[in-house]
Image: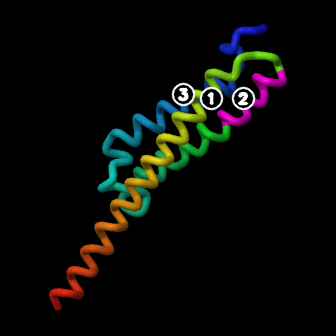
Amino acid sequence: MNDSNSNPMAIASIVLGMLALLANMSWLGSCCCSFLGCGGGAIVLVLAIAAIGTGFMGRNAAVAANESPALATIGLALGGVALALDLVGFVFTFGLFVLGMVMSVANS
């Protein structure tokens, strides 16, 4: 059984997943700056989708080479968590927008 560190897709997946989570926790992807706002959420969205895609490719490559798919699975999970957090931030921001519009119409 080979070392799983030789799988470049798994390494790319875990790096992209960590970058997506870090971008999501910074001002780039906060809920007040979702991907319809200042564009920071779009960066998180692209990084998360790339982490998920490379995670699937890394898992398939690891299984084909009889290696451990652990790094690819971690990257896949990190990308999924970042994507979920980004979508929750978007829904929260959109909900605040709709609530503001409803309150504005109700007060008119």
Percent coordinates x, y for residue 87 in the rendering:
45, 54
Image vertical order of residue 73 relative to residue 88, above or below: above
The single residue placed furthest to the left in the displayed view is 107
Tell me the distance, in whole angstroms, between the alpha carbons under discs 3 and 2.
15 Å
Q: Is residue 25 left or right of residue 57?
A: left
Disc 2 + disc 1, Cβ < 8 Å: yes
Whole-percent x and y of residue 21?
Answer: 44, 36
Q: Relative to 6, does residue 57 appear above or below in the rendering? A: below
| Residue where numbered disc 1 is placed | 73
- 77 or 16: nearer the viewer: 77
Which residue is the site of mark 2?
A: 59
Residue 73 position (above or below residue 48) = above
Q: Position of residue 29 (x, y in %)?
A: 38, 47
User: N-terminal of the two: label 3 or label 2?
Assistant: 3
Which residue corresponds to mark 3?
15
- The x and y percentages for residue 67 are 76, 16
Secondary structure of residue under mark 2: helix
Q: Give the main secondary structure, helix, strand or loop, of the magenta stretch.
A: helix
Give the extent of the magenta segment: 54-64
